[in-house]
Image: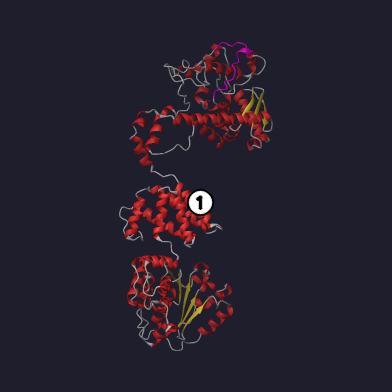
């Protein structure tokens, strides 16, 4: 009896168009073509394995050769239908394209098509896996396929239609066979089980349908395997053990451990899956599908019919969803998807799986921005605190004195100062550099403060006899007409700003008035370098970006020495003749004289200057972080969010520096 056993995939092969599962679009088109007499001479059936391509070809052959036809509903009992169903009809030839792919095979086919059919109405050639034919074989078939005899029909079937030449595709009617849905496969399996009088749990049927991957033939082959192991029927647990499928309970346990941030429990779940012999790539794929179901349950209030979970499994999944958020599930899904890709090419799948699961379990909980804002609105300390006190451009430390009542706090280096009578420059007038002043407190240059084209500004310059004008009407080191009218601007300037302004006045005097400021070019205050870089960057963005990476170790009207890190690309670029000329011209516009420029990226002075700047920037960042963490609103927010922590602090000065480098 075992010798006569017919596998379920052959026993339950579709025999009519209406039996084609999930291919109603193909069945309807072919039936209407037969009914209206518009049957083409060439057909191409393309689709994945086990979805009914060859079965549809046989049904079409029966419909065309049935004694009561051509008809879309062949009788199945006449000699023509029986011979086609049994596979022994002489006029319906099924050819394997993989083993008959040469030009000689196609030449024999061309010779045979000239003969009339022996007993049926048509001579039909069904070529399976037609994409396996060689290019020469396809070329030999072109003419016959384009203009075959009236009694010949060609039906091609393939799983890789993209490998077929377009010259063949254009001579056929193409039908795309779709994957069969999991629910459709499960319903068909239950129908077959009822006919075969076999008992199988609904959950086990669902596992079979899910493992089939859209192929009805695969589902029936798996069912044959299950019935061989459990002739009286099987439970879902027995079926998962037999097929090596990851149990839903293990997937739920893994997801619950990850959501609970229990790394040990999550790693133990991976270990149990590996010890049970599960393929870790299959485990990762099953877990990815389980995360998809969790996302559906979390996103849709009514998820009926959108997941393949049973009632008990859905209840467990909803319990997991209630302990996390949708954005966090999206993040876990992205990490799991990356794990599936990594396992496909990893020589150490267990290592990759452990690391990925540990990363998912330690991932921070993602909270929607709207929820964060709503929580912050409920914090009394956040509503009462002045957030702008630490977000301004020049944030003062907690013990800094308040600004004067007459106006805003004075800038470290005001662009315009009160005019003063000209007097010779003396060495004692030069104030010492302020080493404690952070470099990022220098504000960007203000065009309005540099630019004075009004009559009041020129009149003030002529009457004061002080520092002269730059070419083009730019006054430096004196009060312009508009700047003097600003309320509190000069009144709020502190002593340090006045001394720096005096330095700027003596520095930027034009050459023809050098006698008034002394014979030698004075040193430029280091604080002025940031203003020079910003001024250059307005007109020459690339040059400004290069200068923003430099630290001046010598800065005067005669010599500008710029330090760069060793091997700096910016230093190499500034040594190029065109860039060097542009740099010299830019410094001449800023200093009203052309200094000698030296680029230093190798000396000990350069190394020390770069290290000092890095230390100053680090100290400024740490100070900003300390002030931020001590702010009442931040302390209240970290307490309200239950263990939240500040990950990064960005200062406005640092962002301006990065912006200059990008330019």
The residue labelled by disc 1 is: 355
Residue 423 lies in the magenta stretch: yes
Q: Is residue 73 rendered to the left or right of residue 582? A: left
Q: Is residue 145 rendered to the left or right of residue 383? A: right
Query: In the displayed structure, would residue 576 be above or below residue 53?
Result: above
Depth check, front residue: 538 or 618 = 618
The structure residue drawn at horizontal position 48% and vertical position 49%, both measured from the top left corner, is 359
Residue 468 visible from this viewpoint: no
The structure residue drawn at horizontal position 46% and vertical position 18%, both measured from the top left corner, is 489
- Image quadrant where one finds the C terminus: top right
Going by the picture, which residue comes out furthest to the bottom?
118
- Image quadrant where one finds the N terminus: bottom left
Q: Position of residue 281 (x, y in %)?
A: 49, 60
Q: Position of residue 313 (x, y in %)?
A: 35, 58
Q: Is residue 612 rendered to the left or right of residue 20? A: right
Q: Position of residue 99 (x, y in %)?
A: 55, 77
Picture quarter containing residue 184?
A: bottom left
Numbered-mark total: 1
Residue 223 visible from this viewpoint: yes
Q: Position of residue 428 (x, y in %)?
A: 62, 12
Depth check, front residue: 40 or 107 = 107
Kindly state the secondary structure of the residue where label 1 is placed. helix
Span colored in magenta? 420-437
Picture quarter containing residue 180?
A: bottom left
- Dot 1 crowding, Cα within 10 Å, few <14, some 14–19, many 20+: few
Q: Is residue 303 rendered to the left or right of residue 635? A: left
């Amino acid at each position: 009896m075992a010798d006569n056993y017919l596998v379920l995939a052959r026993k339950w092969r579709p025999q009519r168009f209406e039996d084609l599962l999930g291919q109603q679009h193909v069945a309807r088109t072919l039936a209407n073509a037969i009914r209206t007499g518009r049957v083409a001479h060439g057909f191409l059936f393309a689709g994945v394995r086990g979805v009914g391509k060859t079965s549809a070809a046989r049904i079409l052959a029966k419909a065309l050769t049935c004694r009561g036809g051509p008809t879309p509903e062949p009788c199945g009992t006449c000699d023509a239908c029986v011979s086609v169903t049994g596979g022994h009809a002489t006029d319906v030839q099924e050819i394997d394209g993989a083993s008959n792919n040469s030009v000689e095979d196609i030449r024999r086919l061309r010779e045979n098509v000239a003969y009339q059919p022996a007993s049926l109405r048509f001579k039909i050639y069904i070529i399976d896996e037609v994409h396996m034919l060689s290019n020469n074989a396809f070329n030999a078939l072109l003419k016959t396929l384009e203009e075959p005899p009236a009694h010949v029909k060609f039906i091609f079937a393939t799983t890789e239609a993209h490998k077929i030449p377009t010259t063949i595709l254009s001579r056929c009617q193409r039908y795309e066979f779709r994957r069969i849905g999991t629910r459709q496969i499960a319903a068909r399996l239950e129908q077959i089980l009822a006919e075969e009088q076999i008992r199988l749990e609904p959950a086990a049927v669902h596992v079979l349908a899910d493992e089939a991957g859209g192929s009805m033939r695969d589902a029936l082959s798996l069912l044959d395997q299950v019935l061989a192991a459990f002739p009286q029927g099987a439970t879902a647990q027995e079926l998962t053990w037999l097929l090596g499928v990851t149990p839903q309970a293990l997937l739920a346990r893994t997801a619950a451990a990850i959501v609970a941030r229990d790394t040990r429990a999550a790693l133990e779940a991976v270990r149990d899956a590996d010890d049970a012999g599960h393929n870790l790539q299959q485990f990762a794929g099953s877990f990815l599908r389980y995360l998809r179901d969790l996302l559906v349950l979390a996103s849709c209030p009514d998820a009926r019919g959108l997941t393949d979970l049973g009632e008990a499994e859905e209840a467990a999944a909803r319990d997991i969803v209630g302990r996390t958020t949708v954005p966090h599930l999206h993040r876990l899904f992205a990490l799991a998807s990356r794990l599936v890709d990594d396992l496909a090419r990893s020589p150490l799948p267990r290592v990759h799986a452990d690391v990925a699961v540990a990363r998912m379990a330690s991932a921070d909980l993602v909270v929607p921005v709207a929820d964060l804002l709503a929580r912050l609105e409920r914090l009394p300390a956040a509503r009462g605190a002045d957030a702008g006190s630490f977000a301004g451009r020049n944030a003062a430390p907690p013990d800094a004195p308040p600004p004067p009542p007459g106006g805003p706090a004075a800038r470290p280096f005001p662009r315009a100062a009160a005019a003063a009578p000209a007097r010779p420059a003396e060495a004692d007038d030069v104030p010492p550099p302020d080493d404690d002043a952070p470099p990022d407190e220098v504000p960007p240059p203000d065009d309005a403060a540099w630019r004075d084209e009004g009559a009041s500004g020129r009149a003030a310059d002529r009457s004061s006899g002080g520092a002269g004008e730059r070419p083009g009407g730019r006054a430096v080191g004196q009060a312009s007409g508009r700047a003097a009218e600003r309320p509190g601007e000069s009144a709020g300037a502190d002593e340090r700003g006045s001394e720096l302004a005096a330095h700027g006045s003596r520095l930027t005097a034009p050459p023809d008035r050098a006698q008034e400021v002394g014979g030698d070019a004075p040193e430029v205050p280091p604080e002025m370098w940031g203003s020079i870089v910003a001024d250059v960057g307005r007109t020459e963005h690339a040059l400004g970006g290069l200068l923003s990476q430099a630290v001046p170790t010598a800065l005067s009207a005669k010599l500008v020495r710029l330090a760069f890190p060793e091997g700096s690309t910016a230093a190499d670029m500034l040594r190029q003749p065109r860039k060097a000329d542009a740099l010299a011209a830019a410094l001449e516009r800023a200093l009203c004289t052309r200094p000698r420029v030296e680029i230093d990226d190798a000396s000990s002075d350069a190394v020390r200057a770069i290290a000092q700047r890095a230390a100053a920037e680090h100290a400024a960042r740490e100070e900003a972080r300390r002030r931020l963490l001590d702010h009442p609103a931040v302390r209240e927010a970290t307490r309200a969010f239950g263990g939240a922590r500040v990950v990064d602090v960005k200062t406005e000065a640092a962002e301006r520096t990065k912006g200059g480098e990008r330019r």
